[in-house]
Amino acid sequence: MRIAGLRRRYTRCMVYTSFACGMVLGGCALPVMLAPTLLDSDVQTRLTALAACVSRSQQMVTSALDAGVSAGPLAPANSRIADAQDMLETAQHLLQQQHLPEADAWAVQGLTACEGIAQMVAKACQHAAERKAQTRRSSEAEGRVVQIAACLDGTRSIVEQAQTAAVETAEAQSALSAFESAAAALAHARVALAAHDPETAWEYLDMAATDCQLAQVAGTQATVTAPLSRVPARRSP
């Protein structure tokens, strides 16, 4: 009797243990059984998005070219568009053969490649705009160089006359100092323009224009206040 009771207890224990293990194993396998299945429509949705991205990117490049952006800066964007187009065609071919995982992988990769094209085109457009503005500023600076050079040519005689008439006066010295400063600033502006740095050139041109005007005013004032005996007589024509 004791042996039979022990056997029954052992049997019940084994049954309970097997049942518990089955529950645990079944619970662990449940997420795998419920994993989402890749559908044809899911892949097709990604392919549609990729095709739209490629088309949109091509239109952006065309618009940039129409706006005056050269083909060189847009070459990286065109290369990326070509890569995305190849990935699209590969994914479409795999989808036709019902290779869904492979088609989906190519579609995802194509979308990743295509997403950066808009930024590349925008960067090329920005650089083109900056170069255009720099060219305009350089052209305007060149015109101002001519104006200031003419100012210095006209001021030179005034300063020379002031030096002769009132060499020891503060006005005469100020006129000479301002004239020399204007000439040096103009030289620096020309160097900056040769280095394709119009912004720096404009800073020197502003200094040159201001100093040239100061030289004119100081030279004229020195000549007016100088003793008559030291003012050189004007040569008759």
Image (tube, grey):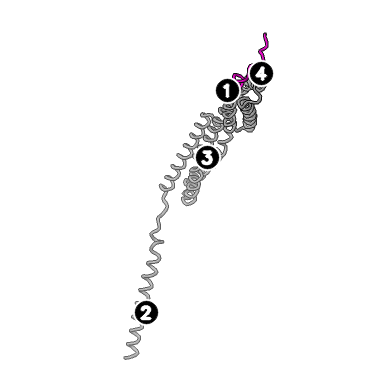
User: Which SS class for mark 2?
Assistant: helix
Number of the front mark, 1 or 4: 4
146 lies left or right of 117: right
Asked whether 139 falls inside the magenta stretch, the response is no
Q: Name the residue under label 1.
A: 217
Label whose residue precedes the other's in the sequence (2 or 1): 2
Number of the front mark, 3 or 2: 3
Q: Which amino acid does label 1 sit on?
A: Val
Query: x%, y% of residue 143?
Result: 59, 23
Number of the front mark, 2 or 1: 1
- Cβ atoms under marks 4 and 3 closer than 8 Å: no
Query: x%, y% of residue 211?
Result: 59, 27
Separation of marks 2 and 1 at Cα, in angstroms: 115 Å
Q: What stretch is highlighted in magenta?
A: 219-237
Label whose residue precedes the other's in the sequence (3 or 2): 2
* Mark 1: few/some/many CA within 10 Å (<14, 14-19, 20+): some
Separation of marks 4 and 3 at Cα, in angstroms: 70 Å
User: Which SS class for mark 4?
Assistant: helix
Name the residue rendered at 36%, 70% in the picture.
Answer: 23
Q: Name the residue under label 2.
A: 14
Q: What residue type is labelled 2?
A: Met
Asked if 155 appears above or below 235 in the picture, the reply is below
- Cβ atoms under marks 1 and 4 closer than 8 Å: no
Separation of marks 2 and 4 at Cα, in angstroms: 131 Å
Q: What residue type is labelled 3?
A: Met
Viewer-proximal residue among 63 and 24: 63
Q: Mark 3 points at which residue?
A: 120
- Cβ atoms under marks 3 and 1 closer than 8 Å: no
Q: Mark 4 points at which residue?
A: 230
Asked whether 227 falls inside the magenta stretch, the response is yes
Separation of marks 1 and 4 at Cα, in angstroms: 19 Å
